[in-house]
Image (spheres, helix red, strand yellow):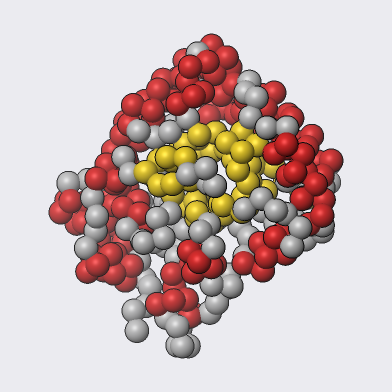
Amino acid sequence: MKYVAFGNRNMEASAIIQGCMRIDALSLDELEALIKNDLELGINFFDHADIYGNGVCEEKFGQVLEKEPSLRDKMILQSKCGIVKGEKNNYFDFSKEHIIRSVDGILKRLRTDHLDSLLLHRPDALMEPEEVAAAFDQLEQQGKVLEFGVSNQNPMQIELLKTCVKQPIKTNQMQFSVVHSCMVDEGIQVNTKFDGGAVRDGSLLNYARLQNIRIQCWSPFQYGAIEGVFIDHPDYPQINQALNEIGEKYGITNSAAAIAWILRHPANMQVIVGSCNQERMQTIAKACDVSLSKEDWYWIYQMAGNVIP
């Protein structure tokens, strides 16, 4: 397993993160087995959100921790808050009251006294940074949250937060894969009229590297946002051909090759994998054992339909 220094405390965090969005479909025995399998593989980072399964995902995870408390000290536990499922529609709430209430609910469901990391879940257009700062200060002083971060935010949104928030923003979750490669497109296709040359995120990847912010990549196998998986999909023949060939070359599966492509980037990103299949997690973890050559990395990028000027 590959590890990266995480947060201001430089916790040793696995490059692959177990995403917990779908664990509500597992029995408690199945979930316990998944957690233990992850830990045996060296995957020590578990990512939640208070809206996953309407709280059931955290509730079940907490029941496993309650049954076997020693597991908690072996893991880095992260959750997110800020998305509210309203009666009419979903909306965002980064108010102090909502953040505090959300974290208390998260901790109760997870049966733990603290989160190693709390992220604001997507941007809130009505965010008041003073409210966020007050919430973060209280949570830190109470020992309920050790590290803080965001998801899907651009550099100026983070800079706005930093005008009031004194805790370092150490994490930003962004969608990233070889078929959703906006973060690197703008740098490769700079000063061109190709679509990929458009700066859509404020040069977020370079900003994150300059500010020592860890990028956590979600949906590494998805095309679009939630439409489906491009691995072995007939509409993506070229990239699958490339991933299969690279997989054979390095002795890994095509899914692991897609993860290895992300991990090869010098930003030392983490990758969130939401699979609940133990065998699949075992094969994907092998992505950490290889380092793609530059030629292979750029070939995969091009076979995904991206332009190399």
Which residue lies at the image location 52% right of the left edge and 15% below the top edge?
A: 69
- Residue 306 image position (x, y, % from top left): 38, 73
Q: Quadrant of the N terminus?
A: top left
Identify which residue, 296 or 155, lies in the foreground: 155
Which residue lies at the image location 47% right of the left edge and 58% below the top edge?
A: 176
- Residue 137 image position (x, y, % from top left): 75, 43
- Residue 13 image position (x, y, % from top left): 43, 40
Q: Quadrant of the C terminus?
A: bottom left
Q: Is residue 86 above or below residue 278?
A: below
Q: Is residue 27 above or below residue 293?
A: above
Q: Is 201 displayed left or right of 191 in the figure?
A: right
Q: Is residue 211 above or below residue 40?
A: below
Identify which residue, 137 or 260, lies in the foreground: 137
Which residue lies at the image location 28% right of the left edge and 64% below the top edge?
A: 297
Q: Is 212 displayed left or right of 290 in the figure?
A: right
Which residue lies at the image location 48% right of the left edge and 17% below the top edge?
A: 70
- Residue 237 image position (x, y, % from top left): 30, 61
